[in-house]
Amino acid sequence: MTQLKYKPTRSRCLLHNAYILMGLCMCLLLVSCSTRQDEASPAAAGEGLTTAQPPAHTAPPSGSLPGSPVQSADLPAAETPPAAPLPTLAPSAAAPVPPPVAPPSASPAAAPYTLDILGTSEKLNKAAWQRMLQWRSNIKQYVRKHPSVVLNGPDRKAVALTFDDGPDSETMPQVLKILKDKGVTASFFFVGSRVAQQPELVKQAYDEGHLVLNHSYTHAELPKLSSGQLREELDKTDEAIERIIGRRPVLLRPPYGETNAAVEQAWSGEDRKLVLWSLDTLDWSLKESKPIEKNVADYVRNGEIILMHTTEETGETAAALPAIIDGLLEKGFRIVGLDELLDTPAYSQPIE
């Protein structure tokens, strides 16, 4: 029997080699796939799950609590959370620029509380009345420029009763009694020559709590005097008052309300003031109590300095005084001394 032997040809060898090569490629492919799957598994790497923090601009997924971090367990396996796109603004017109705001300015200073001088009298003729009105207008303008001269107190419910030209032996004793009975304080501008004549009334007024103040020595028109005469008028009155009450006043009322720079200079000094008036009862001209009362009742305002007189010719002032006081109190006004009304000392020296 003839035995056949395999005799490879060239073509068969090439084909055989190709099969072997293909098998090797398939093996390599399988090994490669298996390796890639092992690398994708966290457990194969020996690592636990970690918290994946989203980028700062990434919104948390639906259902997470406000402020809580996003956990990797909330995401699909083997996926990275997609980054949310940054918000974009639609094009729009430029926002209007607000106008610059001016810094707050200080509130304007309140105008000084300076009253018109009021009070009327049917006893004055037309020429005399016109002169008085002109003086009132002029002195108000003067006071506004000279802070050491005052017409009235501040805008509050208080007034001062002031009496000029005393002391006298007829009207002033009545006035002092009424003031004591009513429990009211007043301010007296005394003429120095009369102080020497009626020292007991000056002492009584002071002891009863009233102010004793300077009204010149002879009731002269001070602006018409020389500097030496002016100084004498003021100093002699101060000295006469000091001899009786032991104190010198720092409040002066120039006779007739007449003043100028020379008078101010002569009276200059610590706490010194020239005190005029804002309500004139015109008691010296009326000579009747009812018109005197009416001037106060009709015209009184906050801070009023009320002018009256105590002389032998002004007895009706004492007659009008009780009704004046009662009317002021009924309207709610406090009646005080000038030192309290103006918040200023009345004397330069303390009580010894």
Image (cartoon, rainbow, N blue to C red):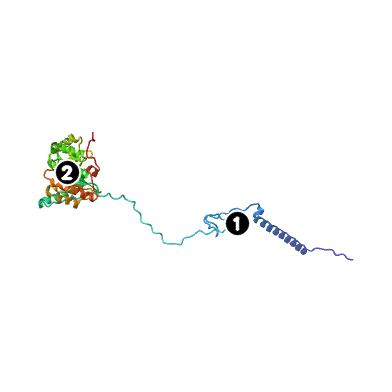
On screen, residue 181 above or below 27: above
Residue 315 locus on image (x, y percent): 13, 45
The residue lying toward the viewer, choosing from 97 and 350, is 350
Name the quadrant of the N terminus: bottom right
On screen, residue 238 above or below 6: above
Residue 91 horizontal side relative to residue 130, left or right: right
Q: Secondary structure at mark 1?
A: helix
Residue 188 horizontal side relative to residue 95, left or right: left
On screen, residue 188 above or below 61: above
Residue 262 locus on image (x, y percent): 16, 41
The residue lying toward the viewer, choosing from 105 and 190, is 190
User: Residue at image x 17%, y 43%?
Assistant: 175
Q: Secondary structure at mark 2?
A: helix
Which amino acid type is marked by label 2?
Val
Question: Which mark, residue 175?
Answer: 2
Residue 16 horizontal side relative to residue 82, left or right: right
Residue 253 locus on image (x, y percent): 17, 42
Residue 318 appears in the picture as rendered: yes
The residue lying toward the viewer, choosing from 252 and 138, is 252
State the residue lying farthest toward the bottom.
1
Name the quadrant of the C terminus: top left
Place residue 70 in its image quadrant. Answer: bottom right
Which amino acid type is marked by label 1?
Ala
Question: Which mark, residue 73?
Answer: 1
